[in-house]
Amino acid sequence: MMQLSLPEHTPLQPGQSAPGRRPRLLVVDDQPANIQALHRVFAADCQVLMATHGARALQLCRERQPDVVLLDVQMPGMDGHELCAELKADPLLRAIAVIFVTSQDRPEDETRALDAGAADFITKPFNPTVVRARVRTQLTLKAQSDLLRTLAFVDGLTGVYNRRHFDERFLAESGRAQRTRSPLGVALADVDHFKHYNDALGHLAGDDCLRRVAGTLRACLRRPTDLLARYGGEEFVCLLPDTDLAGAIGVAQLMEERVRSLALPHPGVGGCVTISLGVSAGCQADGLVEAADKALYIAKAAGRGRVSW
Ligand code: GH3
Ligand code: MG
Ligand code: MG
Ligand code: MG
């Protein structure tokens, strides 16, 4: 069975709702009375967030990642259609299901909403039982797509992100680093003499070791935007947005020390398990991973169990 253990601090990516948490609903309407009416329908089963204008709703979506948004159309400032378009254009918010709840009931209103990516369209005055049923359907679909995304982006052995997700995030963060002229840090970590570890203790013990190392590396990350992924066999990669070389070296050194402190016996080398790390950073993402890889090679050649850059 696949182990799904996303770290507490990891921002919920589209699709990665924490297992077992209550469904999260955001009600957006400029009329507090409408919000209260929907709050009454869902308060018992869902965590209900509320916003009376589009900008606040967008902020709540970014910070709290609701599963479903119940969205009024006519609001001062950003209207429902505009908010829906913003959500669907953002890769981190796209998975949130949008249900319009509106008194605009012409077919063209409904078509426009569905074309813009809305999951459903409910007209006011609404029937609470029908609204509940429709929201329940969207919550079920959302949970299924969350699970699929988790399966697609999380490494089955270690529970950290996989290479595919790293590649996707690296692309997005590279663009951002270049646009905002903020440095992007990369650290590549590789378990030392891991072939000997497997040879001495067996592959299952090797798997356990990789899980322990992955959990230790993950615990070294502090910011919600930091990301750890399994890069390949016994290699992990760490993506550190808004982090310069000195900052990235600091994270890598902490990782090296923490893995060493695990004091996992490594009979293959007559000591404990260690990792080597290569670090790079810059606003220009081209070649960052390659530079970290070169630095990793230098750390290995210099005796392993150390950080190079
Ligand atoms: P170095 O210090 O130079 O990195 O030496 P190394 O032995 O760690 O490097 P090498 O690339 O020679 O061997 C990597 C080993 O990692 C070989 C491979 O069987 C093992 N490995 C890769 N993926 C897994 C895995 O999922 N589980 C286990 N148990 N072992 C794995
Ligand atoms: Mg309104
Ligand atoms: Mg390796
Ligand atoms: Mg190795």
Image: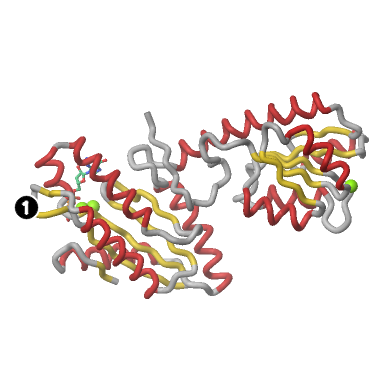
Mark 1 beta carbon near ligand 1 (under 8 Å)? no
Q: Position of residue 273 (x, y in %)?
A: 17, 53
Determine crowd level at label 1: few under 14, some 14-19, many 20+ residues with C-alpha closer than 10 A: few
**Residue displayed at 62% across by 34% down:** 142
The single residue placed furthest to the left in the displayed view is 270
**Residue displayed at 79% across by 35% down:** 40
In the image, 186 versus 305, the foreground residue is 305
Q: Position of residue 233 (x, y in %)?
A: 27, 46
100 lies left or right of 94: right
Q: Which residue does the numbered mark 1 point to in the structure image?
A: 270
Q: Position of residue 136 (x, y in %)?
A: 69, 28
Q: Is residue 105 above or below residue 308?
A: above
Amino acid of disc 1: Gly
In the image, 169 versus 9, the foreground residue is 9
**Residue displayed at 84% across by 52% down:** 79
Q: Quadrant of residue 126?
A: top right
Q: Is residue 18 above or below residue 274?
A: above
Q: Is residue 210 above or below residue 137?
A: below
Q: Position of residue 180 (x, y in %)?
A: 57, 72
